[in-house]
Image (cartoon, coloured by chain):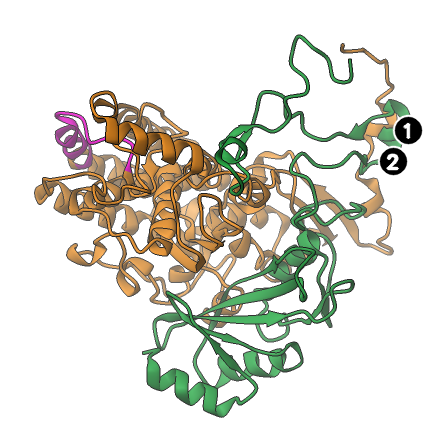
Amino acid sequence: MIDEEFSTELLGNHPYLSHRDSIDWLTVESPPEKLFQFLQSLRDLHGFDILIDLTAIDHGEEHENRFSTVVHLYSLVHRGYMRVHSVCSDNDNPAMPSAAEIYPAANWHEREAYDMFGIKFTDHPNLKRILMWDDYPYFPLRKEFPLAGIDTPLPAADVAEVTDATVEPAPMMGGPFVSSGSGPMSDSEPRAKDESWTEEMEKGT
Amino acid sequence: MSTTKEISIGDIASRGSEAVSKIEGDKMALNVGPSHPTTHGVLRLIMELDGDLINKCEPVLGYLHRGDEKIAENMTYNQFVPYTDRLDYLAPLANNVAYALTVEKLANLVVPARCQAIRVLVCEMARISSHLLGMGVFGMDAGAWTPFMYTFTEREKLYTLFEELTGARFTTSFTRIGGVARDVPDGWLGRVENFVDDLPKAISEVEKLLTRNRIFLDRTEGIGEISKEDALAYGLTGPNLRASGVDLDLRKDNPYSGYEQYDFDVPIGTRGDCYDRYLVRIEEVHQSIRIIKQVIKNFPSGAWYAEDAKKIFAPPKEKILSSMEELIQNFMIVTEGPQIPSGEVYFEAENPKGALGFYIVSKGGGVPYRMKIRAPSFCNLSILEKLAPGHFLSDITVILGSLDFVMGECDR
């Protein structure tokens, strides 16, 4: 059981950890330099066999420490989950130690976090993009990246040469109906993202 | 408006050769996909072959990436429900339920017993439909055409039932945060019961064609063996993990939506090969039938949505049209979204393909700040780099078929 006793003992054994309040599972924060060591002991000593999920959060450009990673682990012994937060100290070149050596499952999750947020996982065996193509220049899940996307060169240079085509931003005319989630209701209610043009009226006319 | 250009496609057609040219000696590089029937969607494999043996296999993903997580940050919780249909599009109802349960967990909201029963019922029907397709195409991957026809016939009956309940065959969008879209129609439960009564007969037809079939056994037994340790290390979940002998079923271990009331067994494999994965799925269909019969037998009466969640669930249409308070409630939920407290939550449900998880960070209000979708197919496929080497090229079709993945969910 992952209970009060377990969490006190865990925090006692690893004094660098700090506890975070959470509504569901035991949540701790580990400094990045201790993360590898901590995950190793979680697997070998505390029975957390499965790395369920690894992802990152962008707290916004105005935030002091912009990026953090979240690991979710599952234990067959305790039949429960645990969550480990780690905050990247450098906002311009966010980095985190790779857990792929301990949990091979982390390999693809870390590639995805790199692909979407630009967090470099040090000592990762094969850190390259996984969902976007290799030469893609942006990190799409960062908060400043627009929902519609940005005009980008085609992944295949030979096709681009013949067709002059680029990867264009998605047309937002007439939908999708998106919400900002903040501000006065006149701004926050769902509305078409771009109302500056319609099917009758072309963009820029 | 639109313009037409003439292009020569000769050079373009020979693309993909960049990956092929690097290998020296007797080795050969083979590119499979992203558009190839073996890969069940748009998975691309770059393989290095030594004769017929696979030396290296590198999966390339992302051909179906639609940025679901980015989209989720831009819309209210209810608006995202249709996007969950398009994750594992072979079991959309199960995705709807997993998503709704996650948000409800964050809001600390428990739905009434009738709503829970409806959700369990549709989840298990989705599991049957997904496994029917999975087994059918698996047989086809191994060279058996006929079982596919039997499973597809049964699946069609299920889709008729889905259509009657939700109004759509595939993109069901059935759940809302705090309830479901509508109550079950009159007589529908009886039709579901008739269907599950007849289903074992159809399954046994498929079993007669496959389970002791010499060719099928030769193609699947001992092929694609995943040890218990590997399955855990690579984060496999669902039938693929259980086929390797790990007893992990979230419906038993972390029961949700009232699964603890129902009596069912969790089939476990011994060897972890393709054949075990097939057997586990067959048995899971039988267990799902058991659950469905229990749900229908004790179908609770009462409300089918959370009546006290005034800031989360929009009331049914007839109430909106006749009462001022409900009209305002509906207006607020549509414009601002269901009001969910701030915090973070992780929840996963036992979906047909494995554990589908949602991690939501909320700063309050109607829109999530960050949503991560933990897709079982994504994790299940990551073992391919380790699993494929040492097998023959012809085994790849069987291994992919037995892993039963969906690219819509994998690429998100």
Is residue B190 magenta-colored? yes
Q: In this view, does B112 lie above or below A30?
A: above
How far across and how far down the image is residue B178, in percent? 29, 43
Is residue A202 magenta-colored? no
- Along the line of sight, the residue nearer the viewer: A43 or B119: B119
Identified at 45% across, 51% down, the residue is B364
Q: Is residue B14 above or below residue B251?
A: above
Whether residue A72 is visible here, answered yes or no, is yes
The answer to whether residue B219 is left or right of residue A162 is left
How far separated are the C-alphas under marks 2 and 1? Answer: 6 Å
Quadrant of image for the C terminus of chain A: top right
Determine the secondary structure under disc 2: helix
Determine the secondary structure under disc 1: helix
The answer to whether residue B392 is left or right of residue A77 is right
Mark 2 nearby-residue class (10 Å; few <14, some 14–19, many ≥20): few
How far across and how far down the image is residue B322, in percent? 20, 21
Whether residue B53 is visible here, answered yes or no, is no
Q: Give the range drawn in magenta.
A: B180-196
Residue B207: mark in rendering? none
Identified at 43% across, 46% down, the residue is B216
* Quadrant of the image occupied by residue B355: bottom left
Mark 1 nearby-residue class (10 Å; few <14, some 14–19, many ≥20): few
Q: The residue under label 1 is which amino acid type?
A: Glu
Q: Residue furthest front?
A: A184
Look at mark 2 in the image and give the residue it sits on: A157
Identified at 59% across, 75% down, the residue is A102
How far across and how far down the image is residue B340, in percent? 39, 49
Q: Which chain appears orange?
A: B
- Along the line of sight, the residue nearer the viewer: B93 or B308: B308
Say which colour chain A has: green
How far across and how far down the image is residue B332, in percent? 37, 34
Identified at 57% across, 36% down, the residue is B41
